[in-house]
Amino acid sequence: MTETKNKMSLTKKVLIGMGLGILTGFLIRSVFADIAFIHDYIVHGLFHVGGAVFIASLKMLVVPLIFVSLVCGTSSLKDLSTLGRLGGKTVTFYLVTTGIAITLAIVMANIFQPGVGIDLAQATTFASKEAPSLGDVIINMFPTNPVSSMAEGNTLQIIVFAILFGIAISASGKAGERIATLFSDFNEVIMKLVVMLMNIAPYGVFFLMAKLFSEIGLDAIFNLMNYFLVLSATLIIHALVTYSAFFKIFTGLSPVKFFRKMETAITFAFSTASSNATIPVTLETATKHLGVNNRVASFTVPLGATINMDGTAIMQGVATVFIAQAFNIDLTLSDYAAVIMTATLASVGTAGVPGVGLIMLAMVLNQVGLPVEGIAMIMGVDRLLDMIRTAVNITGDSVVTCIVAKSEGEMDIDVFNDPDTAYKAEKIGLSKVQQE
Ligand code: ASP
């Protein structure tokens, strides 16, 4: 520890990577925009390749990590009723926090009225998608072929298969014990892969940000300044006020410490705009830094990244009211109730990848009879907002993870309170001898 103490923590390096990336991007955009060499070889060469490799490596870990850690988690549960209780509590908290998020969004959008006086000339067409029925959603959770679920990266199907597999392991006596040991070894190895990836994260984050900010059109934000401000303020209020209150009330622990430990995961979510790609970091944060037992985190984190999207629900709430105001359409109280219901469902159905929240917004607009073309108006500013809402999404997953774990006695408070668990760059050697 003494050696790492004076070295910079990985969290700081990642934050610096992000800051430098944003600055570099702005610089290229404002000063070197016309230089073909920079455009072709730096932005579309180095930054593009570096960022894409980083995202691919993160995604590469998601499926094996979810499967292996969840099998480990489920097979170590004492009895089946624990699983039911865990599932019930988790889903309830996920839905309640999402409901609060969208209600807050509607209230904020009605107070600040970002859509009043907007020029609709820019609206173009937008193709909406049909919402799947609840029955289909349930049927789709069950894999017909677990290998193809993994190949497609279908998180819910992988979760269902891993849980069943884990239960079967614990019911299989000696054979089950042998397989459980194997999986627990697998888990160690995959977590090591996560650590390897964390080591290159500062560079990966730099490339992603530098490319994005050298290309992103910020003029659109000026045109939609009110929408942008109301939405980002609501996201920040929900993260800081609602989550802190929930965290304090239900765990009795310090929300400040919680946010400190979340810095790295939040930075990842922000730079990748994907809850799904952030799963390895969220899981590592929950287990190694927040002190949540893998039995709980291996279930709540991937589930949350798939179905719990408070930030997305907030965007859908503000955007719906904004579009209604821009088109001069009055929403009634029952419309608002419908928005709360559908946006909650739409955020459940939103995949944890960039930009999907906006596509799912069509479902909410359809529900209350608003023109889907409205989505085209806000598309131009969505990328940056997507980054902020993804950070909120994974923070919500982690809050609920801690709440459920604490209530189940599955949270190690000493780890939570230990400031020294902050991310440190870890040397990965190839020597066969483990240095403990
Ligand atoms: N990008 C978001 C996420 O991955 C989903 C969305 O709102 O588009 O959490």
Image (cartoon, rainbow, N blue to C red):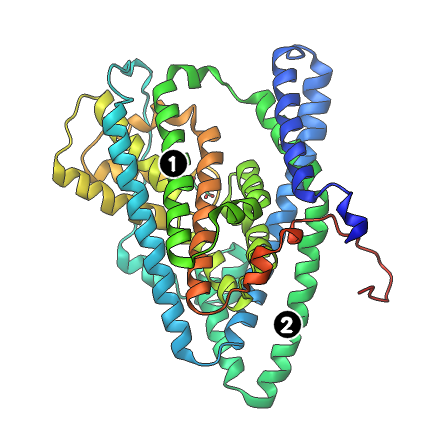
Residue identifier under label 1: 237
Q: Which is more toward the observer, 403 or 211? A: 403
Which one is closest to the eye, mark 2 or mark 1? Answer: 1
Type of residue at label 1? Answer: Ile
Q: Which residue shows up at 70% across the image and 43% down it? A: 9
**Residue 131 in sight:** no
Where on the picture, by quarter, is residue 404?
bottom left
**Rendered location of residue 107, percent (x, y):** 24, 34
Q: Residues within 10 Å of mark 2 (few under 14, many from 20)?
A: some
- Dot 1 beta carbon under 8 Å from ligand 1: no
Q: Which residue shows up at 26% across the image and 54% down it? A: 133
**Rendered location of residue 116, percent (x, y):** 24, 18
Q: Which comes before the other along the chain, label 2 or label 1?
A: 2
**Rendered location of residue 136, percent (x, y):** 31, 58
Q: Secondary structure at mark 2?
A: helix
**Residue 75 in sight:** yes
- Dot 2 beta carbon under 8 Å from ligand 1: no
Residue identifier under label 2: 184
As drawn, is 318 to the left or to the right of 207? left
As drawn, is 35 to the left or to the right of 268? right
Type of residue at label 2? Answer: Ser
**Rendered location of residue 156, percent (x, y):** 43, 60
Q: CA distance from mark 2 to mark 1?
A: 39 Å
* Farthest bottom residue in view: 174
Q: Residues within 10 Å of mark 1 (few under 14, many from 20)?
A: some
Where on the picture, by quarter, is residue 93?
bottom left
As drawn, is 235 to the left or to the right of 3? left
Q: Which residue shows up at 51% across the image and 55% down it? A: 152
